[in-house]
Image (cartoon, grey):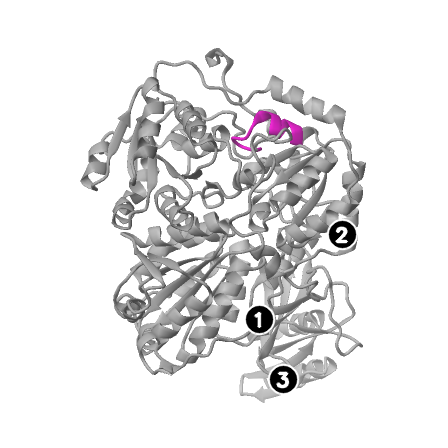
Amino acid sequence: MNQNGHYREQLHTIVALVQDKPGVLTRVASMFRRRGFNIASLAVGKSEQPGLSRMTFVVTGGEDTVSQVTKQLDKLIDVIRVSNLSGEEVVARELALIKVRTTPENRAEIIQIVHLFRGNVVDVGAQSMVVEITGEEDKINALNDLLEPFGIVEMLRTGLVAMVRGQSNARVSDDVGLEQPRLSYDPEIRAAHMVTANYEGV
Amino acid sequence: MKLTGAEIVCESLLQEGVDVMFGLPGGAVLPLYGALAKYPQLRHILVRHEQAAAMAADGYARATGKVGVCTATSGPGATNLITGIASAQMDSIPMVAITGQVPRAAIGRDAFQETDVTGITLPVTKHNYLVMDVTEVAPAIKEAFHIARTGRPGPVLVDIPKDVLQGDKTEFVWPETVDLAGYNPPGDADPEEVAHAAKLINEAKRPIIIAGHGVLISHAYEELRELAEKAHVPVITTLLGISSFPTDHYLSMGMPGMHGMAYASLAIDEADLLISLGMRFDDRVTGRLSDFAPNAKIVHVDIDPSEVHKNVKATAPVVGDLKCVLKQLLPLVEPNVHIDWLQHCDTLRAEHPSINIRHTERLLPQFVLRRLTEATGGDAIIVTGVGQHQMWAAQYCAFSEPNTLITSGGLGSMGFEVPAALGAKVGRPDKTVWSIAGDGGFQMTLCDLATAVENKINVKFAILNNGVLGMVHQWQDLFYERDYFATVYSANPDFVRLAEAYGIPGIRVTEKNDVNAAIQQAMEIPGPVVVDFVVKEDENVYPMIPAGESVHEMMEEPLSEVSS
């Protein structure tokens, strides 16, 4: 928090490996709601490991907030690993479908713009066409801005998915502190001090 | 041998070492009760309201350190558990709640007594399960107990549909291990973190320990005492940490915060290092965060990484099991005396005595609690409700043994005192257990006096009866222009006759001179008893740091009223 009590709002990308079980999305969403964290976007899908899904969150907030988000996420039993990708070299992509209003006169111009962005026209109707575009958020925003004057009928974005570049198995961000479980919990230590424990000689 | 889901629940509970559970049956959970009848090793204590089942399981867990178990039926049975579950979650209490659910085919159809209990309890449990197949019953219960008791403990709910409990039989296989890839509670801390903490401790001139509930949970009281004595560091205990350090120890500095000892809060204000052990910087402890411990660096040891930097930025965070961490830390801490600082703390104590029992005509609640703690030699388990009497108990009672103050700290649920005391006594039959109630909280759960009578649970129920919702009344007095709206109980029942209606003795005390005799008499009666202490109705708890303010706004007892 800064001195005026306002958080410096920033976008942070967080990736979580989670159990693919009923209710996991609810657990995650419930935690965000209850703790007052804001999700700018959320994308969920299968991971390379059977039975596990990967969630990509884009979260708004300062460093402290994001640190809390990652730790609170990691605390959920069904969440296996959390990585804060902020500040990492990542490949980040989002897919958008944009239905734009067309006339016979401007159709060619729109197609040209879409191709400039390496987008695809995936459906053409009499008065509109559907454009598919993949890229980072800025690129999609830019295309959106250019198509706006023609009239956007509908737009749908998947939310960002992100992956660290290079190392195939990079486990980013140690701020969660639990990526490598430390010396395992020792139940004997507890058992030895159950109930009967008392102060002596005080 | 093939067993039903209900029988598997019972076998699993036995595997987990459960010998007692608190509950109340209903339609959806009835198959479990059918099985329980065949398992006399599992003592079932029938309550009068499911809230009592959860809170009794909580009291049992706090008194013994073991996992408390409660059961209820679907729908209203399960929702009635929730205040107790939420209280356990806030205070990190190991608990497993087993609820019946409507049959699988009826789920989602708004069936009779159907509630989405796993949905409702999501934010107030450490984890929960909806068990949709009989083969998942044993693994779910094994995981539930593992999650409830390890790491930072908490309540886990297992919701089982009726047809899973009573339908197809399956072979009972008790899993050897739990498979929870996403759950790795820490043990030892990172040695670098510990070394950093030790360095700060060795450099500190005005250090203070704030010991929280984690000391009790981790059974780290001996290590705490060793640390305090080795470096001569005064020990402040949070409300839930109170019995982790002997009240009469020369380094004991009492409770801090809203109704804590003024000298404790002032010492925090002046300290150059807080050694915060298993505590979470609750707002009742810190007051306004920007003014909290302005001169101090902070060593913060907690088993839950998300507590680090949550409310207060730590200089040296240490994530680990407190007992392990203290074992790592102790050899690195140099012996020290801090003579000036200890003398200064004594001066603070002398200048701000903080608690004082005035000479008044009317019986004072503080007077009752002081007599009670003297009569029990600080050896009883004190179970309180929430409000003024809770704060006075924390201030005026002495504790010499761990887990002897049982109180709903985080959630602050009134009505906790009666059922939690039942659970505590069931768990520690060797101890004298006093339930300390206000007349408000007592009336929230007094129906479970019947449970005490029925099961011969020898709890002594003291009511500090001032005829008002005292703490709210105090806030109205101080902050709401003395508008005592909706805080006066003008038609309380006669608690003595009420006790008699339940078949137990009731004693009324209105005079100071009768307090000792009544306490003695209550302790000599070989069963539950209600003692109705009729006390002064407009007594306020001091010191007080108003909510959201700092130690500089602390109100100490108005001087005009103080006499020695």
What amino acid is labelled 3 in the image?
Answer: Glu
Q: Is residue B128 above or below residue B330?
A: below
The question of residue B258 being in magenta is answered with yes
What amino acid is labelled 1 in the image?
Answer: Leu
Q: Quadrant of residue B188?
A: bottom right
Q: Quadrant of residue B354?
A: top right
| Chain under disc 3 | A
Q: Which residues are magenta?
A: B256-268
Q: Tell me the quarter of the image containing the C terminus of chain A.
A: top right
Find residue A158 and report its horizontal and vertical position in percent: 59, 75
Q: Can residue A140 be seen in the rendering of this structure?
A: yes
Q: Which residue matches tag 3?
A: A105
Q: Earlier in the sequence, mark 1 or mark 2?
A: 1
Find residue B345 and report its horizontal and vertical position in percent: 67, 25
Which label belongs to residue B138? none
Dot 1: what SS?
loop
| Chain under disc 2 | B
Taking the spot 66% from the left edge, 44% from the top edge, the residue there is B223
Q: Which residue matches tag 2?
A: B193
Graded by Cα atoms within 10 Å as few (under 14), some (14 to 19) or many (20 or more), the crowding at tag 2 reads some
Label 3, label 1: how far apart the Cα atoms are: 60 Å
Q: Which residue matches tag 1?
A: B180
Dot 3: what SS?
loop
